[in-house]
Each structure stands twice: as C-alpha cells, then as structure tokens.
Amino acid sequence: MTPSARVQSAIELLDAIIHAARGKGAPADRILAEWFRGNRFAGSKDRRAIRDLVFAAIRACGPVPPSGRAAMLRRAEGDPALRALFDASRYGPAPIGDDEPVAEGGIAPVWLAAALGESGISGEEARALLGRAPLDARVNTLKADSGSLSLPEPGEPLPTRQGLRFKAGTALEQWPAYRDGLIEVQDAGSQLACEAVAARPGETVIDLCAGAGGKTLALAAAMDNAGTLIAADTDRTRLSRLAPRAERAGAFVSETILLDPGRELEALEAWRGRADAVLVDAPCSGTGTWRRNPEARWRLIPADLDRYAGTQERLLEIAGELVRRGGRLIYVVCSLLDAEGADRIASFLAAHPDWRVDPPALALGRPHGTGIRLTPFHDGTDGFFIARLEKPC
C-alpha cells in the first residue's frame, strides 16, 4: 500500500470506530482486527502503519469527531508530511479543502474533562491518560519466580512482588512461558490492587466481580492454592474464560458462581459473613484505561456515571454482607473520577460508621480520600482508586 492509501484506509476505519462509539458497538481493536482479516492485501507493515494512524487520530481528538476525515485532519495539524498525503492519488484521500471541518482537540468531551478536573485530574496528569501504555506482566509464583525465570526478553522489574515491564507491542503471548502459564499479562496497577487484598494461604477470599479472572489468578498465587477462593460474576461469557486460564496457570479456584443481577446475595448466601476478604473490582467508566482504549471516552454520557455509581453502591453493600467480622473489604475501580471512587467509599462509611479504614501500604500511589490513587502520570500504571475497609468485630 502507498502511504496515501494507508491514510485513506485509516480514515475509513475511523468512520467505523466513531459510528460504533456513538452506538456503543464494537471497540476499536476489534474493528481493526476484523478489517485486517478481510483485507489481506494489507501486509504487516501496512497494518502497523494503519493502526498507528488510527490511534494517533483518536488520541488527538477530545469530543467525538464528526467523521474519520475530520479526526485525521486534527492529527495532521502541524504535520506537513501527513497533510501532503491528502493528494487524491489512487486509493488516497482527496486534497484538503479550505473550509473543511476539523475535529476538536482536548482530553475528552467537555463534560467529562470537567469531571476529571473536579476530581483533581488536569494538565499533565490528564494528558498522560492518552499516552501509550507499556506491556506489564506478572510472574505466576505457582509455577515460577521472577528471579530465576528465563524469558526471550528480560523485562524491567516493577515495584510489585512479581511484576515485569516490556515495551508496548512485545509478543509476550507467543512465548512458551506464557503458553505454559508461567507469566500473565497484568498491568502494574492491577497487580497492586491484588496486593491490597493481602490474601493469605488458608483464608476464604471472594472475587465478587471476577470477570475473566485476571485478578482471581493473582489471588490464587498469593494464597499458594491453599484456602477457599470464590470467583463470582454476572457475565457468563467472561466467567467461562476463567477455567481454561486457571488450568494453564495451575491455579485452584474453589468455585465459580454465576450471579443474577439484583439477586446476587441469593447465590452467595452460603458465604454470608464467612469471607476473610472480599474484592470488589467494580464495573466503572474505565477512565483510568484510556491509554489502552482511547476511544472509550467517546462512549460515555453523564447518565452512565449515575448508573455505575448505583451498581458500585449495591456491590459494596453485598460485599459488606459477605465479609466476616474483623475481615476486610477491598474496593477497586479503574477510574479516576471521584464519583466512582472516593465518593462511593465516603457514602458507604456514612451508612456504616463502625467500619474502619485500613489503607493498604503499596509501593506506588498517593492517598486520595480514604484510599489510594494510582495514575499514569505519577505511577506509570493504569489509573486506579483502591480502598480497603475492615468490618467491626
């Protein structure tokens, strides 16, 4: 493909991504993967170049762009080489008109950028949300140790117990160590969230929003497969991915429980008041993950935050019922909005004033409200809010 043809293909992909974002359809990665499968003429260098153009354009825009071309024109501002590729050559984009619409820049849609600012995320802190994320991995201590594990690339040690960092794009999932379950892809912030649980062998631990089980596997390793580990979620498809992952990792999960939304405690009745620790990795806006999913900020509307807050409050109440007296509740969101983090814990404590705040001692992060905040700018991780509470005896 010519450079101009790559730009035109990126514009067409951006049109599809913008349409999907407005309708909360497929994510950008999936749209690109399907396009690459259906257009075999695009070689590996073409695919890499098109992907880079698409994501650079997404990151350059704040609000949802009116079109893929407007998004690419925003990316082309100040880049004469890219502007020159709008040349009407075969398969290339038409020349740039004098009054063509150009997408707006910024961090996010105006209302969302304002909400981040009110939560203390602005300036360089906000711009870092749109950088490129590295590839972090956790060495699975059920099978290996970071001090003795031999890998095709050594990786940079992370300030987590068994974490390694690799450059973005490292084909880690093709390594024998990954196929054999010796390493797991997991952001450093997510690893620290698991460390905040302080799960120990012999305990009863519930991962209340287990999803596909990334944190569940880390908890199994921390418990050394000794104790009772429950993985629960309302999403059947995601939860079904845990069993093969656990088998590959050699992780013992005592039980997986599919929950009925609104009736979660019925399925978990046997564990009421019995858990030493309950992890609530709550559904949220994902504002802390924009380095990986920059178009996600185009999918949010203010009503989404109210809906998430309601779900988060309900999950905190459920977790509180499951924790034994003297046990701990760990609340985690990959969001930097106070409405989903510090405010939710403040609300829970107002309703349960006898619970005690027990901030975890983590290698990264800064105090925020009654918890710890991790950000890409300060910590080099995804954005997280992590709080730990202790139930009164």
Image (cartoon, helix red, strand yellow):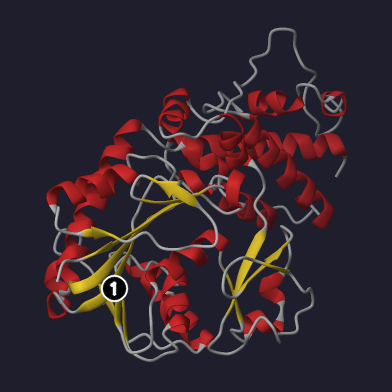
Quadrant of res 226? bottom left
- x then y, percent, for residue 186: 56, 66
Q: Between residues 39 and 321, which one lies in front from this camera angle?
A: 321
Q: Secondary structure at mark 1?
A: strand
Query: Which residue is pictured at 85% across the width and 45% down the height?
Result: 1
Quadrant of res 95? top right
- x then y, percent, for residue 274: 18, 79
User: Which residue of the protein is positioned furthest toward the top in this rendering?
Assistant: 98
- x then y, percent, for residue 306: 27, 38
Give, as a three-letter code, the residue at label 1: Ala
Query: Which residue is pictured at 67% across the width and 55% down the height?
Result: 38
- x then y, percent, for residue 42: 79, 52
Q: Is residue 121 left or right of residue 134?
A: left
Q: How many marks?
A: 1
Q: Is residue 375 above or below residue 69?
A: below
Q: Is residue 42 left or right of residue 284?
A: right
Q: Between residues 26 and 146, which one lies in front from this camera angle?
A: 146
Q: Between residues 126 and 152, which one lies in front from this camera angle?
A: 126
Residue 15 appears anywhere in the view: no
Q: Which residue is mark 1?
A: 277
Q: Is residue 130 above or below residue 179?
A: above
Q: Is residue 142 above or below residue 18?
A: below
Q: Is residue 219 left or right of residue 263?
A: right
Q: Callout 1: few (<14), some (14-19), or many (20+) C-alpha neighbours within 10 Å?
A: many
Residue 220 appears anywhere in the view: yes
Q: Quadrant of the C terminus?
A: bottom left
Q: Is residue 2 above or below residue 71?
A: below
